[in-house]
Structures are given as structure tokens and as C-alpha cells.
Image: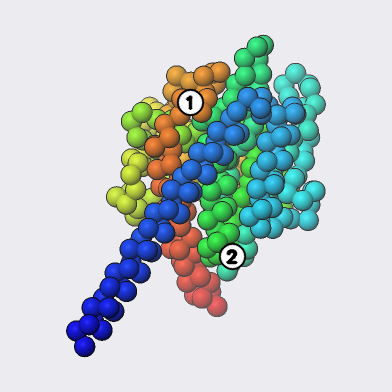
């Protein structure tokens, strides 16, 4: 009997060790992938991804191909995942932008839109503005989250939106909310990421809870479980800090009174400079920031969706 118990205990121990090793290996593989995606998108090959250039076309194809490989569904509008839009800049020059939109059906029809912009400043003279932090970092995280939810079915239906022409006035996000592939009243929240890989103080800001205090709990619930410092702020006009409410693509959703959470770092010396390269990000901070944002999204998908279901039952 003792021998059998020992063997059983050994099997349990072996199983636990194997599972822990597998989880660790999977996490390391995901960290490597998100860093690789950031490095690729911010390489010279993409020429700074300015809207309307060959570099932006290449980035759009990269993102669409990844959406396809992950099995994301696409809306009937547009071609596959590509939704084009037209606009003129301040000088009257016409542009054709491309948003890359895919989704994963959830258990609910209500929608979370997770977004990041893929465009940057392109080439200026002989310099390439690679935009590693701004915003290859957000796009690589977006792809990471799409991979996660393709394997872990969400409660909300999740739309993954890679917006174009943010640097030219949030044009892609504005085009999305003006001609949405779903009803705007289905969108319960926008989670936007713009510059999340470069901070020397281990600080990642979450903007949006000043206007939408009901969202604060989903961040505070997990603050002690993550390795970066999640700070609420840059959305209260009374503090003297820059107000980021409308300074990235979440501004287009805010204009439609759609609640949002925006994740970003404060400006740094490489902001909108040719030196915003992969070599100047903080890799450890970045992978931990991506993990923190995913934890917030998972918390929202579990608890916020449960509250919506409870409210529906009350109505019924």
C-alpha cells in the first residue's frame, strides 16, 4: 500500500511540475513573440508606416495575415479584414487609409473594441521615424491579445481594431465610429493602447476612470497582481497633468459617449524622433505592461460581462 501511495504521489508531483514547466514555457514563448512583432513592425523595412506609403501597406498586410492565421472573423464590409476610408489633410491632400478589423465572437452580443494604431511618421529627409513605442508596441500587444482570446473564448464579443492615420488626426478611429461594422450601442467599452513599451520608472498610466469611475474597479482589482505600476490619471483636468482623454484613438469613441480605458506611458526623449527604435524600448517593462493590460481585459471580460448579464435578467 505504501508503495502504491508513493507512486501516486510521485505521479501527482510529476504532473504538477510538468504543468508548471509548460505554463512557463508558454509565457516565455508569448513574450518572445510580442517582442518579435514589435521589432519587425518598427524595422527600417516598414519605413515608418506613414499612411498612404508602401511601408503602411506592408504593415496592414502583416496585421491582416496575422488575424487570418489566428482565425479571427471579419465583417462583410471591405475586403477581408481591410476597411478603407478617404480623407483630406489640412493642406487638402487626399489620402486613402486602411483600418484592419477582425473579431472573435463571444457568448454575448455586447462588444469590447480593443484598439491600437499602426501608422507613424514615415520618412523625413534621410531619417526613418520607426515608431517602435509609437505605436508598434500597441499593435504587437493587440496581436498578443488576439492570440490569447482565439484560444480562450471570451464572454464579450471582442473586436480587434488596428487603426490607420492616428498621427493625422485620429482619422482611422473616426472613420470606424462614423461607419461602424456593428451598432455603436453594442460597444460597451473601448480599450486603446498607444505607447506602452518605453518607461524607465516602470509606470503605465490608465486614462478614462475620471469620466467613467465605474471602470476603476477593473483596474484596481488586479493592481497588486501585476509587475508594472498601474497609475490612474492623465484624465482629470483639475490636476494640472496633460489630459489624454482625446489625444489618441479613444477620443473618437469618447466623442460618441462610449466608455474607454487608454493605456500609455508619459512622453520620453524618443517621442516622435528617429530614435524611437526597438533598441530604445524597455523590453522587460514592455512584456510586463502587456501582461498587465491583458489582466485588466480578462477582469473586465469576466466581471463586467457578468454585470451586464445580471442587468439583462433584471429587465426580463
Quick check: 130 above or below 300? above
- SS of the residue at dot 1? helix
Q: Residues within 10 Å of mark 1 (few under 14, many from 20)?
A: few
Which residue sits furthest bottom?
Answer: 1
**Residue nearer the viewer, 219 or 6:** 6
Residue at x 73% of width, y 49% of height: 81
- Identify the residue under disc 1: 279
Task: Say which mark, if any, is on residue 106.
Answer: 2
**Residue nearer the viewer, 213 or 281:** 281
Q: Position of residue 185 (x, y in %)?
A: 63, 57
Mark earlier in primary sequence (2, 1): 2
Task: Say which mark, if any, is on residue 39.
Answer: none
- SS of the residue at dot 2? loop
Quick check: 18 above or below 246? below
Numbered circles on residues, count: 2
Left or right placement of residue 3 versus residue 184 in this view: left
Left or right placement of residue 177 versus residue 279 in this view: right
Residue at x 47% of width, y 71% of height: 310
**Residue nearer the viewer, 54 or 86:** 54
Question: Would residue 171 be seen by someone viewing this image from the given angle?
Answer: no
Amino acid at each position: 500500500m505504501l508503495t502504491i501511495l508513493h507512486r501516486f504521489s510521485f505521479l501527482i508531483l510529476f504532473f504538477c511540475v510538468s504543468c508548471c514547466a509548460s505554463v512557463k514555457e508558454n509565457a516565455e514563448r508569448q513574450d518572445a513573440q510580442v517582442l518579435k512583432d514589435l521589432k519587425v513592425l518598427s524595422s527600417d523595412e516598414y519605413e515608418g508606416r506613414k499612411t498612404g506609403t508602401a511601408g503602411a501597406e506592408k504593415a496592414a498586410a502583416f496585421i491582416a495575415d496575422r488575424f487570418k492565421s489566428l482565425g479571427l472573423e471579419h465583417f462583410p464590409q471591405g475586403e477581408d479584414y481591410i476597411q478603407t476610408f478617404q480623407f483630406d489633410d489640412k493642406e487638402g491632400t487626399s489620402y486613402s487609409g486602411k483600418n484592419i478589423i477582425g473579431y472573435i465572437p463571444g457568448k454575448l452580443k455586447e462588444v469590447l473594441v480593443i484598439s491600437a494604431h499602426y501608422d507613424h511618421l514615415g520618412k523625413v529627409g534621410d531619417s526613418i521615424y520607426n515608431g517602435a513605442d509609437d505605436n508598434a508596441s500597441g499593435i504587437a500587444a493587440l496581436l498578443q491579445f488576439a492570440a490569447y482570446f482565439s484560444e480562450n473564448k471570451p464572454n464579450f464579443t471582442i473586436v480587434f481594431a488596428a487603426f490607420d492615420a492616428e498621427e493625422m488626426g485620429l482619422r482611422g478611429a473616426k472613420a470606424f465610429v462614423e461607419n461602424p461594422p456593428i451598432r455603436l450601442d453594442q460597444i460597451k467599452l473601448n480599450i486603446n493602447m498607444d505607447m506602452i513599451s518605453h518607461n524607465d520608472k516602470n509606470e503605465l498610466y490608465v486614462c478614462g476612470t475620471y469620466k467613467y469611475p465605474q471602470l476603476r474597479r477593473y483596474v484596481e482589482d488586479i493592481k497588486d497582481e501585476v509587475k508594472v505600476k498601474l497609475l490612474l490619471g492623465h484624465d482629470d483636468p483639475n490636476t494640472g497633468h496633460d489630459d489624454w482623454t482625446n489625444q489618441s484613438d479613444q477620443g473618437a469613441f469618447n466623442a460618441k459617449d462610449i466608455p474607454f480605458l487608454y493605456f500609455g506611458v508619459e512622453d520620453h526623449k524618443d517621442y516622435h524622433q528617429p530614435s524611437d527604435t526597438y533598441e530604445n524600448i524597455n523590453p522587460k517593462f514592455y512584456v510586463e505592461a502587456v501582461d498587465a493590460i491583458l489582466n485588466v481585459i480578462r477582469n473586465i471580460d469576466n466581471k463586467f460581462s457578468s454585470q451586464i448579464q445580471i442587468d439583462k435578467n433584471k429587465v426580463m
